[in-house]
Amino acid sequence: MFREYIEPVFLSMKLKLTIILTLLLCGTSSVIGQVIEPPEWEITFSKIPSKIGEKVTIHFEAEIPDGWYMYSSDFDPEVGPLITEFSFHEDDQYELLDEIQLSGAKAKI
């Protein structure tokens, strides 16, 4: 007789416990997940200040965290990973004279 009253309460508590544990696990997995932080960039110019008509080289250098990889802009984007891209807004104050040139690239296979 008491069993009829206890089992539904027990199942209900078991269901509640399952739901609570599932929510806790889902919530903590998003906290534990990998934090994606972009690399630190340093940008330097060959001439500051520059005069109208002078050629100025812009040097981009990235500090990439250990265990992370940055894929070169000359890497084939059809192969898979996202490549590093540079975009410049059009402006009358400057003219792009050349493409991005790579230096110090390391191959990791």
Image: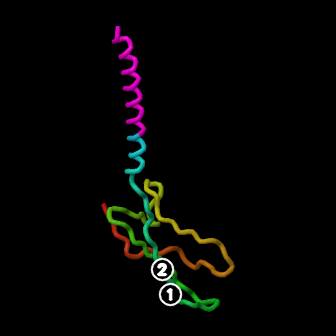
Q: Main secondary structure of the magenta part?
A: helix
Q: Which residues are magenta?
A: 1-23
Instruction: Decide: is 82 above or below 10.
Output: below
Q: CA distance from mark 1 to mark 2?
A: 8 Å
**Residue drawn 41% across the image and 50% down it:** 31
In this orientation, which residue lies closer to the viewer: 39 or 19? 19
User: Going by the picture, which residue comes out furthest to the left?
Assistant: 109
**Residue drawn 59% across the image and 71% down it:** 88
Tell whether 51 sits left or right of 10: right
How packed mark 2 is, by other alpha carbons closer than 10 Å (few <14, some 14-19, many 20 or more), is few
Tell whether 91 sits left or right of 32: right
* Magenta stretch contains residue 16: yes
* Dot 2 amino acid type: His
Q: Give coordinates of residue 16: x percent, y percent.
A: 41, 29
Q: Give coordinates of residue 98: x percent, y percent.
A: 55, 77
For label 2, the residue is 59
In this orientation, which residue lies closer to the viewer: 54 or 4? 4
- Secondary structure category for the residue under label 1: loop
Colour mapping: rainbow
Instruction: State which quadrant residue 81 falls in.
Output: bottom left
Q: Which of the numbered marks, if any, corresponds to residue 14?
A: none
* Dot 1 amino acid type: Ser
**Residue drawn 45% across the image and 64% down it:** 38
Residues under numbered marks 1 and 2 in contact, where contact means CB atoms less than 8 Å apart: yes
**Residue drawn 36% across the image and 62% down it:** 68
* Magenta stretch contains residue 2: yes
Q: Give coordinates of residue 44: x percent, y percent.
A: 49, 82
For label 1, the residue is 46
- Secondary structure category for the residue under label 2: strand
Which of marks 2 and 1 precedes in the sequence? 1
